[in-house]
Image: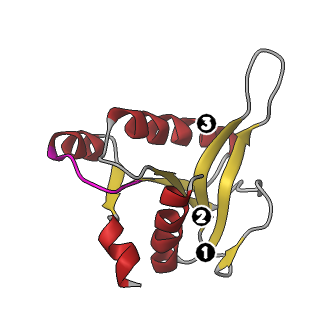
Amino acid sequence: MSKHETWRTRKYWEQTGGLLIEEFVVIEKGKGHGKRMIDGVIVLGEKKKLHDKKSFDIKGRDIICIQTKKGRLGMYAMGQAFFSKELLKQHKPKSIKTVVICGKDDVVLNKLCKQFNIEVVIINEQLLTLN
């Protein structure tokens, strides 16, 4: 993640608690496919902590899948959020909440996110300067 994304993911995590795994490896590199990572996965019900590894056994757990971008909500981030959830399903979590964090909203795309149960969270640069 970049310096523009990490603080946004962590700000969201401050409100939710749980175990935050940044750059969660959902698929290891293999023959015919690349490594796939998710900006953040929060395992709910765990002690509030930043995990020091890129993986965690999420089977049977309630999780939050996070994709973070610094700019306006866009279709690239939406696609990442949607397909990240699909990739996480192979790990058999109990539930998956999908969140896309952006610096600015887009009212048209936000409506579309709601149709697919993707929560949009706006965390802009002004929040960084207030802390």
Colouring of the image: secondary structure
Question: Are the residues tagged 2 and 1 within 8 Å (C-beta)?
Answer: yes
Task: Identify the mark at residue 42; answer none if there is no mark.
Answer: 2
Q: Does label 2 or label 3 sit earlier along the sequence?
A: 2
Q: Amino acid at mark 3?
A: Leu
Q: Which region is colored magenta?
A: 101-107
The residue at 50%/78% (across/down) is 14
Q: Please tell me whether mark 2 sits on a helix, a strand or a loop.
A: strand
**Placement of 13 over or under 71, stated as above or below:** below
Q: Residues within 10 Å of mark 3 (few under 14, many from 20)?
A: some
Which numbered disc covers residue 87?
A: 3
Circle 2 Cα neighbour tier, 10 Å, few/some/many (<14 / 14–19 / ≥20): many
Label located before the other in sequence (2 or 1): 1
* Residue 18 on image: x %, y %: 61, 74
Q: Pick whichever of labels 3 and 1 is earlier in the sequence.
A: 1
Question: What residue is disc 1 on?
Answer: 18
Q: Are marks 2 and 3 in contact (CB under 8 Å)?
A: no
Q: In the image, what residue type sits under mark 1?
A: Gly
Q: Is residue 110 magenta?
A: no
